[in-house]
Image (tube, rainbow, N blue to C red):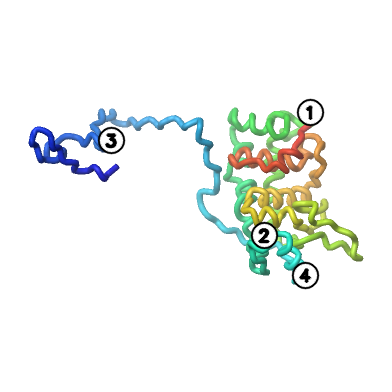
Amino acid sequence: MYLYEGFTIQSRGIGRTTSELGQPNPFNPDNMPTQPLPPGRVPPVPPPNPLVPPPPIVSPVINILAIRSQIQCTAAQITTIQAVVGPGTVITDAVVRGAIGSAHNNVFSDLTDPGMPPRQALTSPRSLITKERFRAAFGRSPEELPWRGARWDLGRIVATRLGGARATMFSSSIRISCFGWPWPGGGLDRPADYMVKTLPKRERVALGALFWRSFANGDAVSQGAAILIAGLVIRYGVSYRMLAPPLRNIHCYVKYGLLMLQHPIPQWVEDKCRAEMV
């Protein structure tokens, strides 16, 4: 645009530039005269282009939180993870710890931060779009009560549980196995079949092959979702079951949070969020 600044007019033998003539440069719209605004008025904001999707909402300040969870990873597990992700990514102990830390500190942090839309929108006056996105995930209005006479509505319950999952997964009591559930006695586990595994009130988390494939593919959304799922199961016993009713289907918490952050919904979340009207 500024390549045309000082463009020389050659017609009629005139060799002066537009700036010498005191006229706006027709090739530079930034120099076109505008009507001054009245005092106190601000220029209107142009409407968004409906053909361009809005960017995801992310934390305005990069704040790397301290990961206090204990990460447990043996040389054999690292070798297995390397086989899962393939030769394109070199897996070391530092890479494993960095990947788990990133899963905590990026999308998961935004899903559970009290100042970010998933929680903030439910603890302040709720907009129409918040209600629509909540219903798209859970099939119910955030203002409905779970039962007659309940003190908290569904929206407040979800906001509280997101906060509880945050506290849980940033706790030093959580132990994270980098690959597979370490069953006592050598019990059978199939980590290639899942993203993350944990049990209610058990402060132990296992990451599966799907988590590491997401890491290799740069799918930060799925990695953050896995950490949220772990926190919700440990603290509240929210169910992995696909057809669990509203506020019991753990994948619907993920879907709601990602909708509020304007992230794409991974297909594995979409397939398993089936909020039933009960």
**The residue positioned farthest toward the left in the image shown:** 13
Q: Earlier in the sequence, mark 1 or mark 4?
A: 4
Q: Earlier in the sequence, mark 3 or mark 1?
A: 3
User: What label does residue 277 carry, if any?
Assistant: 1
Disc 3, SS = helix
Q: Amino acid at mark 2?
A: Ile
Q: Amino acid at mark 4?
A: Ala
Disc 3 and disc 4 in contact, CB within 8 angstroms: no
The quadrant of the image that shows the N terminus is: top left
Disc 1 and disc 2 in contact, CB within 8 angstroms: no
Q: Earlier in the sequence, mark 2 or mark 3?
A: 3
Q: Is residue 70 visible?
A: no
Q: CA distance from mark 4 to mark 2?
A: 18 Å
* Residue 242 image point, x, y percent: 80, 39
Disc 2, SS = helix
Front position in the image: 216 or 103: 216
Q: Residue at x 67, y 43 (%)?
A: 266
Label 3, on which residue?
29
Q: Amino acid at mark 3?
A: Pro
Image mark count: 4
Disc 4, SS = helix
Label 2, on which residue?
100
Mark 3 or 1, closer to the camera = 3
The answer to whether 44 appears left or right of 274 in the picture is: left
Disc 1, SS = loop
Label 4, on which residue?
76
Front position in the image: 119 or 254: 254
The quadrant of the image that shows the C terminus is: top right
Q: Earlier in the sequence, mark 3 or mark 4?
A: 3
Q: Amino acid at mark 1?
A: Met
